[in-house]
C-alpha cells in the first residue's frame, strides 16, 4: 500500500532524514521507533505531504505521491494524527471531529461516521459539546484519532500515541485501534513505548539520527539484543 523509497528530507539546509526506505502493507500495523529527534515526525509529515522530500519517492496505491498536497493525500485516504494531538482547543469535540470530514460533502455518510467514532470512543459522546481544551489527555487523543477517522482513511499515521498518557488510558485506546485496523485501515505508528508498539504491530523499523538502522518482524525486534539494550532497559 505504501512504499517509501530512499527518502532524504531537510528543513532548509539542515538534512534530517537520509536514505529512508519503508513499507506498509494493506491491512498492516507497522511500528516506527527511534529516540528523540531521530526524524520520526519528519517522516510522517513527509508521507502526509506537510514536507516535500529532497530525494526519493513515496509510492501509495501504485502512484508516486511525493510532494502532493496534504489535501490531495487526505482525499486519497491518508490521515495523520499529529504529535501532541493539535486539536482546536476552543472548538467543541463535535466541531473538531467534523473538521476531519472537511473535504467531504456526503452529509449522510459523515453523520454515520460521527456515530461510528463516538461508538468507538463512548466518552466522546458524553463530551460531544464540550470544548476540546477541557478534555483529559486521553480524551484528547481519542478526539484526535476520531478526527483523523472522519476522513475515512485507508492509511492512518499516528504520531506518539501514548505520550503523556497513563498506562491504563493507553490500554483503553488499543481495542479501538485494533477495530479500526480490522475494518481495513492500515496503521503506521510512531510510539515511544517500544514494547507496546512491537506487541501491537506486525513489523517495525528503527530510526537513529535520520537513518534506518533496524527493520523486521515485531516479534524478532522484541527479542533483538540491540532493541533490548537500547530501548527496553535491560
Ligand atoms: N521545523 C523544523 N526546522 C528545523 N529542524 C527541525 C524542524 N522540525 C524538526 N527539526 C529537527 O529535525 C530532527 C528530527 O526531528 P523530528 O521531530 O522529526 O524527530 P522525532 O523522531 O519525531 O523526535 P521526537 O521523539 O522528539 O518527537 C531533529 O533534529 C529536529 O530538531
Ligand atoms: Mg516526533
Image (spheres, rainbow, N blue to C red):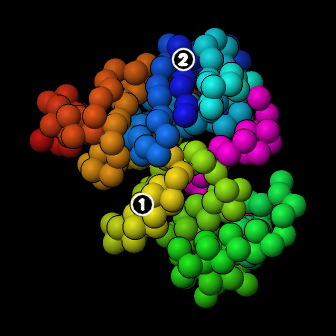
Local SS, label 1 = helix
Dividing the picture into quarters, in which one does residue 50 lie? top right
| Secondary-structure class at tag 2 | strand
Residue 61 is at least partly visible in this image:
yes
Pick whichever of labels 2 and 1 is earlier in the sequence: 2
Position in image of residue 190 (x %, y %): 45, 43
Q: Residue 66 magenta-drawn?
A: no
Q: Which residue is drawn at 42% across and 60% down?
A: 178
Residue 227 horizontal/vertical position (percent): 22, 33
The structure residue drawn at horizontal position 72% and vertical position 41%, both measured from the top left corner, is: 76
Crowd tier of the residue under label 1, counting other residues whose Cα lies within 10 Å: few below 14, some 14–19, many 20 or above:
some
The alpha-carbon separation of the residues under discs 2 and 1 comes to 27 Å
26 and 222: which is toward the camera: 26
Circles 2 and 1, Cβ within 8 Å, touching? The answer is no
Vertical position of residue 232 compared to residue 214: above or below? below
Q: Specify start and end residues of the magenta stretch as a single range.
A: 68-88
> Relative to 227, does residue 164 appear above or below in the rendering?
below
Whether residue 140 is visible: no
Q: Quadrant of residue 167?
A: bottom left
Q: Label 2: which residue?
A: 5
Give the label on residue 50, or none.
Answer: none
Q: 10 Å neighbourhood of mark 2: few (<14), some, or many (≥20)?
A: some
- In the image, what residue occupies the spot 58% across and 45% down? 155
Q: Which residue, given by chain and number where applicable, does mark 1 sit on?
A: 178
- Which image quadrant: the N terminus? top right
Q: Does the residue labelled 1 lie within 8 Å of ligand 2?
A: no
Residue 202 in percent (x, y) is at 33, 42
Ligand 1 is found in the corner quadrant, namely top right
Residue found at x 48% / y 34%: 24
Horizontal placement of 175 versus 186: left or right?
Answer: left
Amino acid at each position: 500500500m505504501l512504499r517509501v523509497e530512499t527518502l532524504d528530507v531537510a528543513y532548509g539546509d539542515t538534512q534530517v532524514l537520509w536514505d529512508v526506505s519503508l513499507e506498509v502493507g494493506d491491512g498492516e500495523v507497522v511500528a516506527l521507533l527511534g529516540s528523540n529527534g531521530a526524524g520520526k515526525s519528519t517522516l510522517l509529515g513527509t508521507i502526509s505531504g506537510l514536507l516535500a522530500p529532497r530525494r526519493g519517492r513515496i509510492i501509495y496505491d501504485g502512484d508516486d505521491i511525493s510532494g502532493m498536497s496534504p489535501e490531495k493525500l487526505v482525499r486519497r485516504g491518508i490521515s495523520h494524527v499529529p504529535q501532541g494531538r493539535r486539536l482546536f482547543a476552543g472548538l467543541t469535540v463535535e466541531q473538531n471531529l467534523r473538521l476531519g470530514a472537511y473535504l467531504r460533502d456526503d452529509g449522510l455518510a459523515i453523520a454515520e461516521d460521527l456515530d461510528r467514532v463516538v461508538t468507538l470512543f463512548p466518552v466522546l459522546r458524553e463530551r460531544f459539546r464540550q470544548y476540546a481544551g477541557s478534555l483529559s489527555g486521553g480524551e484528547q487523543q481519542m478526539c484526535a484519532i476520531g478526527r483523523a477517522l472522519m476522513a475515512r482513511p485507508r492509511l492512518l499515521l499516528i504520531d506518539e500515541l501514548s505520550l503523556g498518557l497513563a498506562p491504563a488510558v493507553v490500554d483503553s485506546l488499543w481495542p479501538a485501534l485494533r477495530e479500526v485496523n480490522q475494518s481495513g485501515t492500515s496503521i503506521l505508528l510512531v510510539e515511544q513505548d517500544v514494547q507496546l508498539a512491537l506487541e501491537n504491530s506486525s513489523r517495525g523499523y528503527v530510526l537513529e539520527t535520520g537513518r534506518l538502522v533496524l527493520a523486521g518482524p515485531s516479534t524478532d525486534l522484541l527479542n533483538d539484543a540491540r532493541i533490548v539494550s537500547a530501548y527496553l532497559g535491560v
